[in-house]
Amino acid sequence: MYPLFFLSALLAEIIGTIAGFGSSTVFLPLALLFLDFKTALVLVAIFHIFGNISRVGFFKHGLDKRLIVKFGLPSVLLTLLGAMLVPYISQDLLKVFLGIFLVIYAFISLWKDNLQVKPTTANTIIGGSLSGFLAGLIGTGGALRGAFLTAYKLPKEKYIATAATIALAVDFIRLPVYIFQGFLNKEFYWYIPILLTLAVMGSYIGKQIVSIIPQHNFRKLVLVALILIGVKFIFDFVS
C-alpha cells in the first residue's frame, strides 16, 4: 500500500505540473484508492501546500494583489464553510460529489479546450466562492479556479504566483479545520516528510518533461483518466 500511495503522489505532482492544473485534482482520487475520504483530504491538502510554497517563492514578484483580494477573500470564506460541512455528509456521498465534479470538469475541458469566463467583478467573486467551497468540501477546487483566473490573461509568472497564493490561503484555512475535527490519525504523521520530498521532486521532474512531451496532448490523456476515475466513484456509489 505505502509504495503505491507515495508513487501516486509523485505521479500526481508530475502530471499536475505538466497538465497545467493543480496536483490535488489528480492526487485526491488516487489517494482515495488507499485511504478513507477524511484522511485523504488532510494528506492531499498538506501535499498541495508543499507544491504551492515553491511556486510562490519562485514567482512572488508577479503577484496580482487585486485578484488575490477579489478572488481570494470569497474563496477563503467559502472554503471554511465547505470544510465545516464535511463531518455532516457521508464519505460515500462526498466521493460521488467528487466523481461528478471530475466528470463534468473533464468533459467540458475536452469539449472547450481553453475554458474560461468573462473577467467581471461578479464572475470573480462567484468563481472564488465556488472554487473555495469545492476545495473545502471535496478537496479540489483548482480546476474551477483556473477557469476563472485564465479569463484575466495574466502573464505566466503572474498567473502562477497569484493562483498559488490563493491556493495556499485556501489550504491553510481548511487544513486546521480538518485536523481539529480529527480527520488525521497519528499513524499517518510519518507520511508528511515523505510527501514534502515527493512534492519537490515531482515539480522538478514535471518541469523537465514539459519540454519533451506536447502539453496539449498530454493534458487530454489526463482529462480522460479523470473521467474514468470519476465514473468509478459514481458507479461505486450507485452499485
Image (cartoon, rainbow, N blue to C red):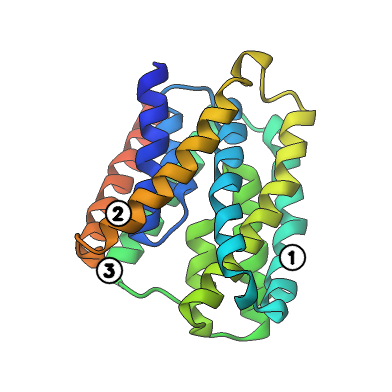
Q: In this view, does 33 lie above or below 211?
A: above
The alpha-carbon separation of the residues under discs 2 and 1 comes to 28 Å
Q: Is residue 65 above or below residue 36?
A: below
Task: Look at mark 3 in the image and give the residue it sits on.
Answer: 111
Residue type marked 3: Trp
Local SS, label 1: helix
Between 195 and 66, the one nearer to me in the picture: 195
The alpha-carbon separation of the residues under discs 3 and 2 comes to 11 Å
User: Toward which corner of the image does residue 74 lie, by quadrant?
Assistant: bottom right
For the point 30% across and 72% down, the residue is 113
For the point 66% across and 23% down, the residue is 184
Mark 3 or mark 2: which comes first in sequence? 3
Mark 2 or mark 1: which comes first in sequence? 1
Q: In this view, does 217 lie above or below 38?
A: below
Can see residue 20?
A: yes
In this picture, residue 89 sits left or right of residue 11 = right
For the point 42% across and 43% down, the residue is 201
Residue type marked 1: Pro
Task: Look at mark 2 in the image and give the residue it sits on.
Answer: 223
Mark 3 or mark 1: which comes first in sequence? 1
Task: Look at mark 1 in the image and give the residue it sits on.
Answer: 74
Q: In this view, does 101 lie above or below 109?
A: above
